[in-house]
Image (spheres, rainbow, N blue to C red):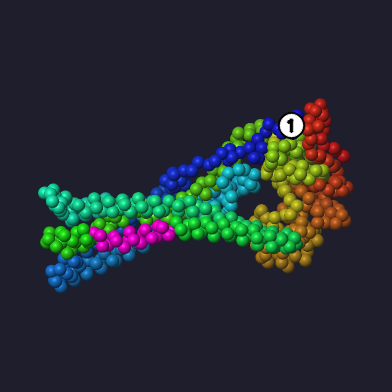
């Protein structure tokens, strides 16, 4: 029989199916919909309404400015000092109102951008860190590389750009609606040459034609920008991630003298940035070249097409300038897609990366629901026993590591599980809730807190007091409790540094970090402790003293020590030796074979 089990394996993920690319508007809706209905939705909706009202105010001031320009040039054409002074006073009012409305609009817009980013970051970080998804995501297929960059950078870009684009789009639509009427009324009508056909409001269709031609050519030259922007952001994130990993593993790299390889890897990742940057530069070149010509012609073109009306005396200088400005406003509104092509590409790329991470996390939850009996269940109960029932553990390929394992540990008992390192490490991850792939049940006692201690205890940056108390706040422990924990584990020399801040994982050797792990146990006083190879930096005598100290200080502690070192059996009341499952054992298991040797 094959060494595969019919349970869901880590790699058996729907993520293997290519991810469907969503439209830009659908991406924005998926990100904005839940925010619009969040707990403080009334505040969000109120701010959105206020932003819309301020945008309406900006449009109103733009229309007022258009009519003011007509009045000013008419006054200049008539050479009336009083008329010019009146328009100067009107301009002062428009100027002041524009500053107030624009300033208020900026504050409201930035509040919405920050609040949306804050809410979305909180939601995604909470989902990412919940139920060990941040760990399990590493074993799931799909587009979720560099989740830290997606949360820190792509959420910022997506939220800020989406709101800014939304504002400019609404503004452009309002301008479009109002200035069509203005341009129609001021442009008058012309008679087509060689005919008696009058063409009323002729500047309006010409504005649409000018903007339409510009939009078509703009989309044609700008299409590569979406693809190159997405590729460049991915390359940048990969480069940052590589540098971050180098910093995190600085000691190992230095010991292996791996700096040349790290430089090669960094250079290779940066060459991808250079390649994608150059591709984006070419895409920008086409857009900028076209945009420069398009923009340079825009102020001149409406004056040229309206000049015959002015020369014929059918419009005043003020009307001519008003028509020219209305033409520019109308074509600018119609050109919104072209003008914002780069920002749309940037926003779309970031929104897609955020949604891809969110979908990968949702897929993990869906897999959990589909597994049902094929997943390892972690249950809490009131009994003072840690019980493992019919446990089967699968490796990342779906092959069996351990099959039908049973164990019962009482409170106050110290048990050692040793044997094949991959099997023992898998069991540690299962008990910690990190590895659901397999079957069986783990009954965890709910009578007292449980603390899991890995081979290299995690020490967050900050003060030593905070690191020792982690994951609890340091202020719940007295100074005397902390000092005693350090003294009992042979770390009294660290007491003067309790309030010093440092990167303790880099500044302290492994032996000291492992002693700090035991000091954390003494400080937090859990009822149960599960340890994995947490004394491999100790010498045999130090190991014995440390476990004797634990039994002395916490005499009712339930201890499960998972290690690949069988020599530790002398320090425990019971030892279980686990071997890797083999196909030859399947028949024996079915007839009552027990793969764990208990001594």
**Residue 157 lies in the magenta stretch:** no
Q: Quadrant of residue 65?
A: bottom left
**Residue 25 position within the rendered picture, expressed as x and y whole percent measured from the top left:** 42, 46
**Residue 293 lies in the magenta stretch:** yes
| Lateral position of residue 430 relative to residue 172, left or right | right
| Residue that appears at 19% across and 59% down | 306
Q: Which residue is mark 1?
A: 2
Report the residue that reaches farthest toward the top: 591
The stretch of residues the image draws in magenta is 284-302
| Residue that appears at 31% across and 50% down | 212
| Lateral position of residue 335 relative to residue 181, left or right | right
Report the residue that reaches farthest toward the bottom: 81
| Residue that appears at 74% across and 36% down | 400
Q: Identify whether 396 is placed above or below 499.
A: above
**Residue 278 position within the rendered picture, expressed as x and y whole percent measured from the top left:** 50, 59
Q: Identify whether 436 is placed above or below 351.
A: above
**Residue 238 position within the rendered picture, expressed as x and y whole percent measured from the top left:** 58, 55
Q: Which residue is at the front of the view, 414 or 191?
A: 191
Q: Residues within 10 Å of mark 1 (few under 14, many from 20)?
A: few
**Residue 270 position within the rendered picture, expressed as x and y whole percent measured from the top left:** 58, 60
Where's the C terminus, which quadrant? top right
Q: Identify whether 423 is placed above or below 298.
A: above
Q: Identify whether 573 is placed above or below 1.
A: below
Question: Which element carries disc 1, helix, strand or loop?
Answer: loop
Q: Which residue is at the front of the view, 430 or 408?
A: 430
| Lateral position of residue 573 relative to residue 447, left or right | right
Q: Quadrant of residue 175?
A: bottom left
Q: Which residue is at the front of the view, 201 or 367?
A: 201
* Residue 491 seen from this side: yes
- The prevailing secondary structure element of the residues shown in magenta is helix
């Amino acid at each position: 029989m094959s060494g595969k089990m019919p349970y869901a394996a880590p790699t058996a993920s729907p993520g293997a199916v290519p991810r469907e690319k969503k439209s830009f508007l659908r991406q924005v809706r998926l990100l904005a919909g839940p925010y619009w209905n969040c707990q403080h939705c009334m505040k969000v909706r109120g701010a959105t309404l206020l932003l819309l009202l301020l945008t309406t105010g900006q449009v109103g001031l733009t229309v007022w400015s258009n009519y003011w320009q007509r009045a000013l040039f008419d006054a200049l054409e008539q050479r009336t000092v009083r008329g010019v002074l009146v328009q100067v006073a009107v301009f002062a009012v428009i100027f002041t109102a524009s500053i107030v409305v624009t300033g208020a609009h900026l504050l409201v817009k930035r509040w919405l951008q920050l609040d949306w980013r804050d809410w979305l970051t909180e939601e995604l970080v909470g989902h990412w860190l919940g139920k060990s998804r941040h760990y399990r995501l590493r074993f799931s297929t799909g587009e979720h590389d560099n989740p830290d960059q997606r949360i820190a950078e792509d959420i910022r870009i997506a939220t800020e750009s989406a709101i800014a684009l939304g504002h400019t789009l609404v503004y452009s639509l309002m301008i479009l609606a109002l200035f069509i009427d203005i341009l129609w009324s001021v442009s008058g009508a012309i008679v087509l040459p060689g005919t008696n056909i009058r063409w009323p409001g002729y500047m309006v269709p010409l504005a649409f034609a000018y903007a339409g031609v510009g939009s078509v050519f703009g989309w044609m030259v700008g299409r590569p920008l979406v693809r190159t922007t997405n590729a460049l952001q991915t390359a940048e994130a990969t480069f940052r991630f590589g540098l971050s990993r180098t910093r995190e593993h600085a000691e190992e790299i230095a010991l292996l003298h791996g700096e040349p390889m790290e430089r090669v890897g960094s250079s290779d990742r940066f060459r991808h940035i250079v390649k994608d940057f150059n591709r984006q530069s070419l895409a920008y070149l086409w857009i900028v070249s076209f945009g420069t010509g398009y923009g340079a012609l825009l102020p001149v073109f409406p004056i040229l097409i309206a000049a015959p009306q002015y020369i014929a005396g059918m419009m005043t200088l003020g009307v001519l300038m008003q028509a020219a400005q209305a033409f520019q406003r109308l074509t600018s509104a119609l050109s919104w897609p072209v003008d914002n092509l780069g920002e749309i590409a940037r926003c779309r790329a970031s929104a897609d990366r955020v949604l891809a991470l969110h979908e990968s996390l949702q897929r993990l939850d869906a897999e959990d629901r589909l597994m049902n009996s094929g997943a390892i269940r972690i249950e809490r109960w009131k009994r003072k026993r840690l019980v493992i029932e019919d446990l089967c553990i699968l490796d990342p390929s779906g092959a069996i590591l351990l099959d039908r394992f049973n164990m019962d540990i009482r409170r106050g008992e110290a048990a050692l599980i040793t044997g094949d390192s991959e099997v023992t490490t898998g069991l540690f991850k299962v008990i910690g809730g990190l590895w659901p792939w397999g079957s069986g049940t783990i009954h965890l006692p709910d009578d007292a807190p449980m603390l899991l201690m890995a081979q290299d205890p995690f020490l967050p940056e900050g003060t030593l007091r905070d690191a020792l108390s982690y994951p609890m706040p340091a202020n719940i422990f007295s100074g005397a409790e902390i000092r005693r924990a350090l003294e009992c584990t042979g770390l009294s020399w660290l007491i003067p540094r309790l309030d010093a801040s440092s990167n303790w994982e880099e500044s302290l050797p492994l032996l000291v970090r492992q002693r700090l792990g035991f000091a954390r146990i003494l400080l937090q006083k859990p009822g149960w402790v599960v340890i994995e190879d947490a004394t491999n930096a100790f010498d045999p005598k130090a190991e014995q003293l440390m476990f004797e100290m634990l039994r002395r200080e916490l005499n009712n502690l339930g201890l499960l020590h998972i290690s690949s070192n069988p020599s530790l059996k002398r320090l425990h009341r019971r030892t279980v030796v686990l071997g890797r499952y083999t196909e030859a054992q399947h028949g024996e298991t079915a007839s009552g074979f027990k793969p764990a040797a208990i001594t």
